[in-house]
Amino acid sequence: MYIFRNKYYSVSLQPELQAIQFHWEKSHAEMTYEDFQEACCNFLGYGFEYQVKQLVIDVRNFQLSLPPEFPAWQQNEHYPRYYKLGIEKVAYIMPAVALDDAKEVEKTEGKFALKNFPSLEAAKAWLH
């Protein structure tokens, strides 16, 4: 069930997983970095609204070039919102060719587990 959709991305509720799903649309490549940050914050806003504990992030269409300051923003500003929300698991859906190089994180105290998958079905199996 879509809860937000524009030409750049969509957010849908996955109630059976207690999750929200973020999907990049192909037209997102024309976004600015500020638009990207706003999209990430908007997505998490829905997490707070629906009190989810899991996130599904579909990056199979992702084409935006992120600036060098992105990792610091992610660690210092974005991930703390994950922790405040109490996110337990984050599943990234990505092209199979990117899986070998993708980072995965084990769950630790107060943090979330992050795994990467080639399909929504595989991600859902892990999130159950």
Image (spheres, rainbow, N blue to C red):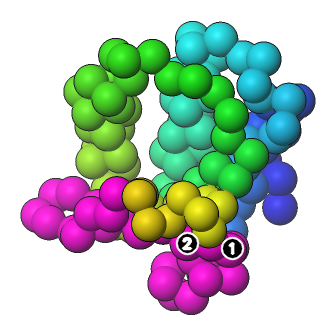
Pinpoint residue 45: horizontal percent, then vertical percent: 54, 36
Farthest residue, direction left: 109
Report the residue marked by disc 2: 117
Mark 2 falls on what kind of element?
strand
**Vertical relation: 87 (above or below) 14:** above
State which region is magenta: 103-128
**What is the three-letter code of the residue carrying label 1?**
Leu
Residue 54 seen in this snapshot: no
Query: Residue 114 in magenta?
Result: yes
**What is the three-letter code of the residue carrying label 2?**
Phe
Going 45% across and 16% down the picture, which residue do you hit?
A: 67
Query: Residue 104 in magenta?
Result: yes
Density class for disc 2 (Cα within 10 Å; few <14, some 14-19, many ≥20) is many
> In the picture, residue 95 is in which quadrant?
bottom right
Pinpoint residue 12: horizontal percent, then vertical percent: 74, 55
Going 35% across and 46% down the picture, which residue do you hit?
A: 82
Q: Nearer the viewer, mark 1 or mark 2?
A: 2
**Vertical relation: 36 (above or below) 121:** above
